[in-house]
Image (spheres, helix red, strand yellow):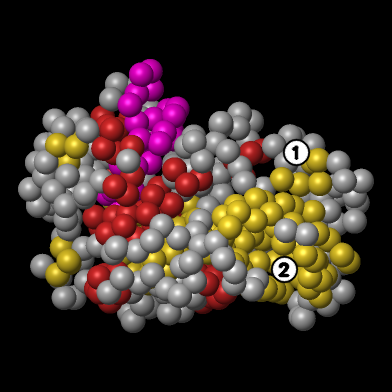
Amino acid sequence: MTDHSSKSGRGISRRGLLQGAAVTIGGSALAGAAASPATAAATKPFIPSGLTYSASDPLAGFFRKVAAGTATIVTAGDSITEAFGAASPQKGYPARVRARLRNGAGQAPGGFDYVPARSQYATVDKPPTTVTYVSYTGANGAAIDLRSATYAGARSTKSGLGRRAVALTGTGVRSATFTQRCTSFVLSWRATSTRDAVSVTIDGTKVTLPAVSTGEQTWTSPKSASAVRTVTVTWQSGEPFLEGWQLFDGDEGGGFHVLEASQSTSRTEGFSLASSAANGNDTWADALRRFSPDLITSMWGTNDYGVVTPAVLTQQTVNYLDLVHDRSPDSALLVIMPYQLGKASAAEWAKYRAAQQQAVTTFRSANPGVAIGFFDLGAYVPPYFGQTGTTGNTYMYDGIHPNDTGYDVIAAILYAYLTSTPA
């Protein structure tokens, strides 16, 4: 297992944290933090200067791949992974991890990677101020606001990374548009039959894409010079589902990619049909094959706490792991336990942490050749990030979600883990 003990650290300012990838992680700890995660958990977050792994660590192969400067990571989870409360998705921890990995390897910033067809947090009771990238129009060309409660695509959460697809129809949401800088992109959509078709318009140039089969469909745009481009995907026939786009900006050839694949308000049960949840399904995992991830991470637990028992969470986590391994058998897996909710009982939270650890142990026993690890974020981030509630909290948007600063702390900690070196 990975050695979570840290090397010597140094103070780092809030301004430095806000600079994201510009921060040098080697030997960085928050000012006033204790010298080890075990004692830091009562005061302030702790950013380890570096972590090590043994030769027998299940993720040793993945760590070596990171050291070589190339890896594709898919991050599943709930609203914390979706960057609820950040200024934009690019301020969330998945995008910040990518920026740190690229910066550490001397790679250019590159594109945004995966942009799902919609933001799940846009339809919660109290949407955050976090910006979204995609706009929508109906059959009459009028704008449709997916933030409103009037949008309820019954099948729109079934497919794609994060289960955040949008059903395109002739009468409902007819088209979806984004404007971003890129050199090319990969369009992800799903066909319910070979009657389905969509069109893609790039800066006014239209291409029609009929479904070649049922299920997952992929189209890669021609590569061009880096420029801000407007891309619209429009319904043509049938019942297609738009899943999202992977955006490149000169980084098509390799390097680091981190694809955010989460869903706000979700629990573990929704990401495996075997867990028998009312909204559960396996369809979303078909999209994993398109991206061939080297590592798939999951960070659930915040919404599971107090809703299901620890024993049930163990089984639901195993169900999820079974599914993603079936769909992407060459991917390493990492279960991340989130930091403790501020209002949660420490003793009860420990039971849910143990439940996820048990799921990893159970899955590993049944699949001895699969690379799978467990990482406890709560060993580095205390409840409320070490502060006394949410009022004036340096790191939090509300009582659950980080703000830009808090997300950067999480990214710095995960960066230290993902770049672990041999012991």
The image quadrant where one finds the N terminus is: bottom left
Rendered location of residue 160, percent (x, y): 63, 62
Q: Are marks 1 and 2 in contact (CB under 8 Å)?
A: no
Q: Quadrant of residue 362?
A: bottom left
Per the image, is 400 magenta?
yes
Rendered location of residue 133, percent (x, y): 62, 46
Segment colored magenta: 390-414
Rendered location of residue 213, percent (x, y): 76, 80
Q: Which disc number belongs to residue 190? A: 2
Closest to the camera, between mark 1 and mark 2, is 1
What SS does tag 1 mark? loop
Task: Give, as a three-letter code, the residue at label 2.
Answer: Arg
Judge left or right: residue 420 versus residue 307.
left
Residue at point 80%, 66% (across, down): 206
The residue at the far top in this view is 391
The image quadrant where one finds the C terminus is: bottom left
Q: Earlier in the sequence, mark 1 or mark 2?
A: 1
* Label 2 packing within 10 angstroms: few (<14), some (14-19), many (20+): many
| Of residues 252 and 155, the one drawn nearer to the viewer in this rendering | 252
What SS does tag 2 mark? strand
Residue 290, relative to residue 99: is it above or below? Answer: below
Task: Give, as a three-letter code, the residue at label 1.
Answer: Asp
Residue 149, relative to residue 285: is it above or below? Answer: above
Residue at point 64%, 31% (across, down): 125
To which residue does mark 1 refer? 145
Residue at point 51%, 62% (across, down): 249
